[in-house]
Structure formats: structure tokens, C-alpha cells
Amino acid sequence: MIKVSVFSEEEAWSKRLKNTDIFFKKICKAFPKKYQFSNKKVSLSLLLSNNKNIKKLNRNFRNKNKSTDILSFPFNKKIKLSKNMYLGDIIISYNYLNKPKSQDLELFKQKTIKIFIHGFLHLLGFNHIKNKDYFKMLREENFIYKHVKSKIN
């Protein structure tokens, strides 16, 4: 079971997603079995942020002085699934996902689900530094996304 602790420092999120806790809980419940970690207590934190604050974090922790769509900070480099495990932190920028501003709610939700899955995989050790790793991660993202879409729509 995955427990997501959702925090928000950008009020615009609540205008698009009425109950962020339930939204992200549904996503995790819809993950394929291999990512549900049954009989384990797996947790992570999610900060719903904006470009200004994510830029500060990106500069402080990655030496990149620019905003980005998502940051993931795994708690451990090597994943050893134990009975109780904290995966790490994910930060998502509202401004990145809300482009174009004219997009409908459904597209916004799809983009949010996809980027959350991306960050989740980073917490599990996936990356996209090399091409082969990029394609491996992309396959997993698509696999999880299709599974989630089939269950929550």
C-alpha cells in the first residue's frame, strides 16, 4: 500500500483539483499490482508548488537556476523494500502543468497523473540520463499510466 502525504503551497491547485488527497490516493490505488507493494507500508510526500518555489529548490539542490515541471528526491539511492519504507519527496509545479491556461480539466488531470507517475518512478531509482534508461522509464510510465487510466475513468 502506498500512502501519499499531499501538501500545497500554491492555491491554484485547489481550483483545479477539489480534493488533492483523494485524487492522488486514487492514482496510487489504480497502480498495477507490482507497484502497489501489498503487505508493505510505503509512503512518500508530494508538494504541489509553483514555478517560483520549484526554481529555488532546483537551484539549491541541483544547481540549475530555472523552474521545472517536477523534482524528485529519493530518500535512498538503493531501493530495498522493507515492511515500512519512505520513498522520498516529489514536488510538482502548477504553472508547468497549467499550460496552456485554456486547457480543460480533463487534460490538466491527465498531465498531472503522468508527471506524478514520472516522479514516482524517479523515487524508485528510474532515470533518463542515458537513452536506454530513458526508454526503460518511458515504457514503465506508459504501462502505469494505461493501468491508471483504465481504472479511474
Image: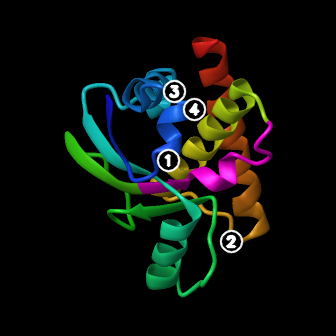
Q: Secondary structure at mark 4?
A: helix
Q: Which residue is mark 4?
A: 16
Q: Which residue is mark 2?
A: 129
Under mark 4, the amino acid is Arg
Q: Which residue is mark 3?
A: 31
Above or below residue 102? Residue 29 is above
Q: Secondary structure at mark 2?
A: loop
* Mark 4 vs mark 1, CA separation in Å: 21 Å
Q: Which of the two labelled residues, at mark 4 and mark 1, occupies the earlier sequence position?
A: 4
Q: Which mark is residue 120?
A: 1
Of badges 3 and 4, the one in the foreground is: 4
Under mark 2, the amino acid is Ile
Of badges 2 and 1, the one in the foreground is: 1
Residue drawn at x 58%, y 15% is 152
- Label 2: how many residues lie within 10 Å, few (<14), some (14-19) or many (20+)? few
Query: Most extreme residue toward the left, as rendered?
Result: 84
Where residue 150 appears, as percent x and y from the top left, is 66, 14
Q: Which of the two labelled residues, at mark 3 and mark 2, occupies the earlier sequence position?
A: 3
* Mark 4 vs mark 2, CA separation in Å: 32 Å
Find the magenta span and give its range: 90-102
Where residue 123 appears, as percent x and y from the top left, is 45, 55
Q: Quadrant of residue 129?
A: bottom right
Q: How is the image coloured?
A: rainbow
Residue drawn at x 40%, y 62% is 74
- Label 3: how many residues lie within 10 Å, few (<14), some (14-19) or many (20+)? many
